[in-house]
């Protein structure tokens, strides 16, 4: 990677509908997290790294998204 290139950056997922309702007391419901991860995997993302508050997934082009375990 040259100095001109920006490294991939994880982006936070926006929760909607039932997924937003799953966030209770600062913690995300396990089933909601599994659903988010399965949705991203269906779009070609694979687990890349664990972070202090979630999991980072990356697709083949290097784009990263983060699923947070806490809000």
Image (cartoon, helix red, strand yellow):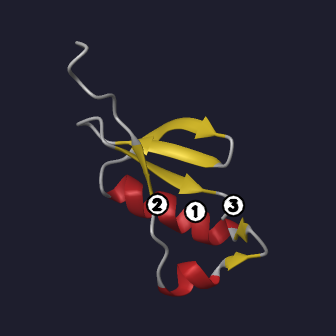
Residue 11 higher or lower than 51, as above or below:
below
Q: Give the alpha-carbon distance from disc 3 to disc 1, as whole Å.
A: 14 Å
Q: Residue furthest right?
A: 25
For label 1, the crowd category at 10 Å Cα-Cα, with few meaning under 14, some 14 to 19 and many 20 or more, is few
Could you say where residue 55 lies in the image, as x and y percent from the top left? Answer: 57, 46
Label 3 element class: loop
The answer to whether 10 appears left or right of 55 in the picture is left
The reply to whether the C-beta atoms of the residues labelled 1 and 2 are less than 8 Å apart is yes
Instruction: Residue 7: name its quadrant.
Output: top left
* Image mark for residue 38: 2
Task: Indicate which label's residue lies in the foreground, 3 or 1.
Answer: 3
* Image mark for residue 19: none
Q: Give the alpha-carbon distance from disc 3 to disc 2, as whole Å.
A: 18 Å
The residue carrying mark 1 is 34
> Of marks 3 and 2, which one's residue comes earlier in the chain?
2
The reply to whether the C-beta atoms of the residues labelled 3 and 2 are less than 8 Å apart is no
Task: Indicate which label's residue lies in the foreground, 3 or 2.
Answer: 3
Could you say where residue 65 lies in the image, as x and y percent from the top left? Answer: 42, 49
Label 1 element class: helix
The residue carrying mark 3 is 70
Residue 8 higher or lower than 38, as above or below:
above
Front position in the image: 38 or 18: 18
């Amino acid at each position: 990677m040259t100095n001109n290139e920006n490294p991939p950056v994880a982006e936070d997922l926006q929760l909607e509908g039932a997924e937003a309702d799953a966030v209770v007391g600062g913690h995300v419901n396990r089933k909601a997290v599994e659903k988010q991860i399965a949705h991203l995997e269906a779009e070609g993302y694979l687990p890349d790294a664990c972070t202090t508050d979630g999991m980072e997934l990356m697709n083949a082009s290097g784009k990263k998204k983060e699923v947070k375990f806490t809000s």
